[in-house]
Structure formats: C-alpha cells, structure tokens
Amino acid sequence: MKLIILDRDGVINEDSDAFIKSPDEWRPIPGSLEAIARLCQAGYRVIVATNQSGLGRGLFSIDELNAIHSKMQHAITSEGGQLHGIFYCPHDPKEGCDCRKPLPGLLHQISQRFFTDLTDVPCIGDSLRDLQAAAAVGARPILVRTGKGEHTAHDSRLDPQIPIFDRLNDAVDALLIQENSNT
C-alpha cells in the first residue's frame, strides 16, 4: 500500500494566521487539487494530518470543521482525486496532547488505522512541526514553500537534507518522476 500524508493549511489550501474557520474561508492553493488527483491515479492513498487548535480554542465548532472538510473532499473529488482519511488534532496547544504536531501521535494514529509502518512514507508540510512529526516516525519529510513554507525554508533548525518544492504540484511531480525511475 502506498500512502502519502499531507498537511492541510498551507499545503492543500491557503493558510491564515486567523485560522480557517468556515467553508467560505477554505480556498485551494492553485494546482493542489490536481496534484492530489494525480497521486490517486498513481495508486497512492492520500491522508491529511492537520493541527486544528482553533477547535480547542473555541474559534469554530466541530460542525464547521466538518463542513470545511466536506468542501475540501468535494473539491478534490471533482478533480478526480480522493482522500482516504483526515486526521486532526483538535486540542489547544496548552493541553499538552501527544497528537499535536510536532509530536507524532497523529501519525501513529494513521499507522494504526492503515496497519502499516510509516517508514519512508512521504509527508508533505509547510511548517517545521510537520517535518519534525514525519521524522519522528521515520517518514520522509518534504517541505513546500506555500503557506508558512517560505519562512520554514529559512529556519536554522531545518534539516538541509529535506527536499523543498515551491508547491504541492511540484513535490508530486518530483515524487512521481522518482517513483517511475525506480521501477
């Protein structure tokens, strides 16, 4: 089984420091929906792993989060793609949970749900915490410059071995080219 794990805000959709609180605020990054469709066509199961502390902070309700995810899934489906799971941490950072990235709890949940080890599974994110969570489970962190990614690319704590791409579409291009050259 081929899995790929994507962060949501800043990778699939435009990010906001004020949080994405409603379906109206959810806007896909150009090319991201098509990139997900191409992953699906290449046999990947696409999983989303996202911190959603706005829920724990009371900025939006579970119904609003579900409506945002419904809009995202519909948009991806309309491009020929599919999400095989959406995993999220709903906690306020002060709660000290183990599912808030950079801790690996969310990724452990994915591993358990899909009965698979995440070693070398591509994990695409725009923040250092996305990449740290991926590294903690032996997955393959990949950075995109969208969202907070441009700032992250200049973070002195960033492992220089982590590949950096302008956007999800470019990361998927490279991943599929590499996959085809290995077969």
Image (cartoon, rainbow, N blue to C red):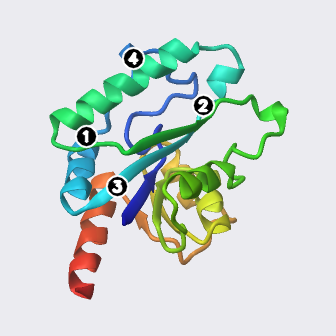
Q: Earlier in the sequence, mark 1 or mark 2?
A: 1
Identify which residue, 130 or 14, lies in the foreground.
130
Q: Earlier in the sequence, mark 3 or mark 4?
A: 4
- Mark 2 touches mark 3? (CB < 8 Å): no
Q: Residue at x 65, y 52 (%)?
A: 129
Mark 1 vs mark 2: in front = 2
The residue tagged 3 is 45
Q: Earlier in the sequence, mark 2 or mark 4?
A: 4
Q: Residue furthest bottom?
A: 182
The residue tagged 1 is 30
Disc 2/disc 4 C-alpha distance (Å): 14 Å
- Residue 110 horizontal side relative to residue 108, left or right: left
The residue tagged 4 is 23
Disc 3/disc 1 C-alpha distance (Å): 21 Å
Mark 1 vs mark 4: in front = 4
The residue tagged 2 is 52
